[in-house]
Amino acid sequence: MRDLYCKVFINSSMTREEIADKISDLLNLKLSEHPLCIENNHLNIDFRRNKEHDNSKIQEIPDGFLYFPYFMDIDIVDEKRVTEYKEIIKEIMFCLWSEKCQIVVASDFESELPHEGGYSLFLNQNHSK
């Protein structure tokens, strides 16, 4: 079976805590504050600051997203719920886009996600600048 872990890089004017609250509300799950995470019986989401964050590199093609200020580590717990897991990731993507976040998902299944996990949007947004 393929690796189902994914990392969602996030560039936003919202704080990491605001992003975590938004996702917690979306999924109707309790947010733990230390560490900042959401867990249930089929997935784990950790909200992290990106130690590689660098505003001067964010616009670089092709890898500027690696320097976004935040990321989420998302991993599946119940591998019998792969379809639901991927749908939740899609919901998270649309939620963050609705909040004007720039996101890119890095995973083995990113090609199955909208806009190749957001990567094609990242390229289009930064190529046009």
Image (cartoon, rainbow, N blue to C red):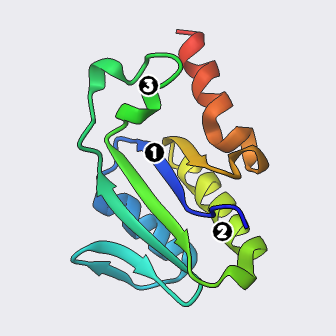
Give x and y (percent) for residue 39: 45, 82
Mark-to-mark CA distance, 3 and 1: 10 Å
Name which residue lies at 53% across and 82% down.
28
Quarter that holds the N terminus: bottom right
Q: Nearer the viewer, mark 3 or mark 2?
A: 3
Q: Residue furthest front?
A: 1
Q: Residues within 10 Å of mark 1 (few under 14, many from 20)?
A: many
Residue that label 1 marks: 9
Neighbours of disc 2 within 10 Å: few (<14), some (14-19), many (20+): some
Q: Is residue 108 left or right of residue 53?
A: right
Amino acid found under the numbered disc labelled 1? Phe
Q: Are marks 3 and 2 in contact (CB under 8 Å)?
A: no
> Which tag, 3 or 2, sits closer to the chain's start?
3
Q: Position of residue 109 (x, y in %)?
A: 71, 52
Residue for point 71% across, 39% down: 116
Please name the amino acid that badge 3 sits on: Gly
Residue that carries the numbered disc 2 in the rendered image? 88
Mark 2 or 1, nearer chain start: 1
Look at 55% across and 90% down and name the residue there. 41
**Structural distance between the alpha carbons of marks 2 and 1:** 16 Å
Q: In the displayed structure, does residue 129 sit left or right of residue 87?
A: left
The structure residue drawn at horizontal position 61% and vertical position 53%, both measured from the top left corner, is 93
Choose top left, top right, bottom left or bottom right for residue 83. bottom right
Residue 117 lies left or right of residue 52; in this view the side is: right
Label located before the other in sequence (3 or 1): 1
Residue 92 vertical position relative to residue 106 in the rendered view, above or below: below
